[in-house]
Image (cartoon, rainbow, N blue to C red):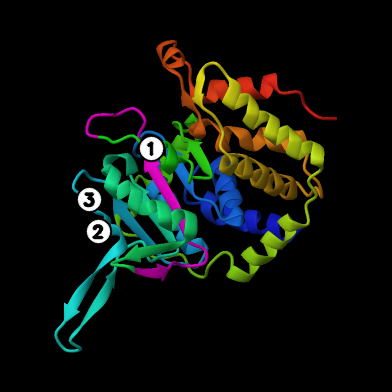
């Protein structure tokens, strides 16, 4: 078993007993962690997205902070502010919740555009600028943001530039009947509503994550596969019902995700099936539908599937 496969097995074992029926989401999180990407989780409230973020931070042995998106949330509430200290006669930084290993931004689309933009620099460059000073973030800084796609009153849709910073968007739906029954059995007591203690020890270490990343670099990508990813990007830019197609950053996300997917199944090279596996996670949220497509009720997932059908698979 490779370092990457062992990493996923440990996280699946640890998190699978806490968040029931989210095996696919946990695999997507593994891909994002190893690829140094960020994740947008979209789905109805009350499905365990916050619990997943907390449990993941504990399993990684890192710190965790949570920010609730509201209309009055300001950028300084996330990044922090300088406060004058009487004792030292200097301005001292009071760091905000962004200085952490795993940051959960709950209902990110309820925060205003100015606050949403405060995350752009942090997500892309893993640093923040406060009062003309630049501060580095944790090397493994990971953003898990959630949003409810069914409730639009008082929300601010994420702009294209913000969506493009997320490597993946995972759509969470209601669990299967047996999974929901297991959740009710596990968390149906009054005692289970008490604050759970942090998971200890951590399921994985930073050394194991580094070793998993080394496995990815050894996965071969043929020129034909790079051409396949570029063909998908080109098809998205030329599609009549897509106003804004896949960016170069999006194509990189597809390629990196496919490399991790190939390594997770023990392969030393990427196949078109690996690309098809990660496209539903990495492409739909980057597609801006045209007015005609919106009127027809087309979805970004349907258009992403159509792109895969249109592009010829290399042999």
Looking at the rendered structure, the secondary structure element under dot 2 is helix
Proximity of marks 1 and 3: CB atoms separated by less than 8 Å: no
Residue 148, image x and y in percent?
Answer: 35, 34
Q: Which residues are magenta?
A: 133-154
Q: Is residue 285 above or below residue 30?
A: above
In which image quadrant can residue 296 be found? top left
Q: Crowding near pointer 2: few (<14 within 10 Å), some, many (20+)?
A: some
Residue 265, image x and y in percent?
Answer: 75, 46
Q: Nearer the viewer, residue 213 or 93?
A: 93
Looking at the rendered structure, the secondary structure element under dot 1 is loop
Proximity of marks 2 and 3: CB atoms separated by less than 8 Å: yes
Between the residue at mark 1 and the residue at mark 3, the CA separation in whole angstroms equals 17 Å
Between disc 1 and disc 3, whose residue precedes? Answer: 3
Q: Crowding near pointer 3: few (<14 within 10 Å), some, many (20+)?
A: some
Q: Residue 301: which numbered mark, if any?
A: none
Q: Residue 73: which numbered mark, if any?
A: 3
């Amino acid at each position: 078993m490779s370092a990457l496969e062992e990493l996923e097995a440990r996280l699946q074992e640890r998190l699978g007993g806490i968040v029931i029926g989210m095996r696919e989401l946990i695999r997507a999180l593994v891909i994002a962690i190893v690829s140094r990407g960020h994740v947008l989780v979209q789905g109805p409230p009350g499905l365990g997205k916050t619990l997943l973020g907390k449990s993941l931070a504990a399993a990684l042995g890192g710190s965790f902070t949570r920010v609730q998106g509201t209309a009055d949330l300001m950028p300084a509430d996330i990044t922090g502010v300088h406060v004058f200290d009487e004792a030292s006669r200097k301005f001292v930084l009071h760091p905000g919740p962004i200085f952490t290993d795993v940051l959960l931004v709950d209902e990110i689309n309820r925060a205003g555009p100015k606050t949403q933009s405060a995350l752009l620099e942090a997500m892309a460059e893993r640093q923040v600028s406060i009062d003309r000073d630049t501060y580095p973030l944790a090397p493994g800084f990971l953003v898990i943001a959630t949003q409810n796609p069914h409730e639009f009153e008082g929300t601010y849709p994420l702009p294209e530039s913000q969506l493009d910073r997320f490597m993946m968007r995972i759509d969470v739906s209601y669990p299967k009947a047996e999974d929901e029954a297991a959740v009710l059995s596990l968390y149906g007591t009054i005692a289970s509503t008490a604050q759970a203690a942090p998971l200890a020890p951590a399921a994985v270490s930073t050394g194991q994550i580094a070793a998993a990343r080394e496995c990815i670099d050894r996965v071969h990508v043929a020129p034909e596969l790079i051409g396949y990813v570029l063909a998908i990007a080109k098809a998205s830019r030329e599609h009549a019902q897509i106003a804004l197609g896949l960016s170069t950053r999006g194509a990189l996300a597809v390629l990196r995700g496919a490399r991790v997917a190939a390594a997770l199944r023990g392969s030393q090279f990427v196949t078109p099936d690996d690309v098809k596996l990660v496209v539903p996670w990495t492409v739909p949220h980057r597609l801006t539908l045209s007015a005609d497509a919106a009127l027809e009720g087309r979805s970004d997932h349907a258009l992403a599937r159509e792109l895969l059908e249109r592009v010829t698979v290399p042999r």
